Amino acid sequence: MSNIFEDLENDETQGPTIFKDKRPLDHRWLPDKLVHREEQIRQIAKNWIDVLSNVTPSNVTLYGKTGTGKTAASKFAREQLIDIARKKNIFVKVEYIRCTDYTTEYQVIAELCNKLGRDVPNRGWTKGEVVNTFRDIFKTNAFGKKLHLIVILDEIDILLDKDGDGILYTLTRTENVSVLCISNYLDFKNLIKSRVTSSLNDKEIVFPPYGADQLSDILKERAELSFNENVLENDVIPLCSAMAAKEEGDARYALDLLKNAGELAFDEDSEKVTNNHVKRAKDKIEHNKVIEIISTLPLQQQRVLESILNLTKQKEEITSGKLYEAYTDLYKKDAVTYRRIFDFINELEMLGIISTNTISRGRGKGRTNIIKLQCDETLLETTLFSI
Ligand SMILES: Nc1ncnc2c1ncn2[C@@H]1O[C@H](COP(=O)(O)OP(=O)(O)OP(=O)(O)O)[C@@H](O)[C@H]1O
């Protein structure tokens, strides 16, 4: 029996396929060089270099919006540090923790212990027991050398918000340990008490959004590794870069556009990726994003959204009062209070699913909030009813 994959590979009627290697278009792929981030990487290295003289480096915080290369730059610096430390025979480890996966101090410290060869259960011990086990690691010498540890805490805001600043207190008060925090928010230090801010005493490095030209340079590097020659029409990279520059200079979004455009072309057996594929890739990404947001909303918010949808279909002007009425009509039993509805409206607006506009009804009649759906009605309906 013939093999379908072999048949496809040997099919002479097929032109060159679109992709040479899709891996470089993946978010997690770490390129050999990070263009336009040389200065930030240098700054990280300047802080970490102390460890090569057996001195604990200062703590560092990287700030910047989504997709500005913070994770990539810190992992790049990590690879380079580990490489030189190995050559110089320095005992240093750099451990990366994504705080969306480890959301409490206990979980982070237990994970670090496990990475450093001490068995700690995911739950069951007291926090004190876990912290003591962690600190013990730095009291003993391995082969006559002391371990230096640098902990990268990516998306630190999530952990601080959920479990407080104990994790930073513990890490910054442990001998031979330093931290590199990554945050999307400049004001993340509001989540830290002053005793922790003073022991953190960090150097701050800012990652500005990429401009369209910088995104173009990034995409060109990745495209060369991923796409076969002459497959991308000339305006594809400039278009992806311009669109992503508008989305706050997000390199991840630029890569997503390019990858999805390539996949659309591949699915259609097209020999070229065109700007039309890019435009459709944008719609596809937005479509998937809306589905993801709606399906992960808490139940009560989904119900409020359903009420907004019903009113929109009836071509009603939606005020908060009318929305509450429609919502309680639908879900009398466990309806939330009128005040909670305002929080929901704010949250849905922040997610970009609805917009609100305050209008004045004229003298003495006060001001009213008008709510409008900002996503496709059919998409919302099918998503809500398939959850
Ligand atoms: N200068 C660059 N050169 C090449 N690729 C880059 C560059 N900057 C970012 N990227 C790529 O863009 C994607 C997003 O980057 P990264 O994850 O580092 O952003 P981030 O700032 O950490 O975002 P978030 O805050 O959402 O985690 C990754 O695939 C990364 O490899």
Image (tube, rainbow, N blue to C red):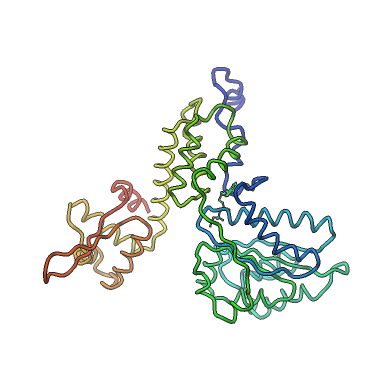
Rendered position, 8 above or below 216 = above
Can residue 1 be seen?
Answer: no
Where on the picture, by quarter, is residue 335? bottom left
Q: Quadrant of the C terminus?
A: bottom left
In the rendered image, residue 79, in percent from the top left (x then y), is placed at: 71, 54
Q: Position of residue 81 (x, y in %)?
A: 74, 57
As drawn, the residue found furthest toward the right would be 144
The residue nearer to you, when weighing 377 against 364, is: 364
Task: From the viewer's side, name the closer residue of 339 and 385.
Answer: 339
The residue positioned 38% from the left and 55% from the top of the image is 294
Total numbered badges shown on the rendered structure: 0
User: Residue 185 versus residue 133: which sits nearer the camera?
Assistant: 185
Q: Is residue 216 above or below residue 6?
A: below
Does 309 sit above or below residue 149? above
Q: Position of residue 291 (x, y in %)?
A: 39, 50
| Quadrant of the image occupied by residue 173 | bottom right
Q: Give the quadrant of residue 329.
A: bottom left
Q: Residue at x 54, y 76 (%)?
A: 192
* Residue 308, visible in the rendered structure: yes
Q: Is residue 334 left or right of residue 85?
A: left
Q: Residue at x 59, y 23 (%)?
A: 7
* Residue 304 in the image: above or below residue 268: below
Query: Can you say which quadrant of the picture contains the N terminus?
Result: top right
Residue lying at the far top of the rendered structure: 12
- Comparing 31 with 294, the one in front is 31
Where residue 275 sits: x, y (%)?
44, 33
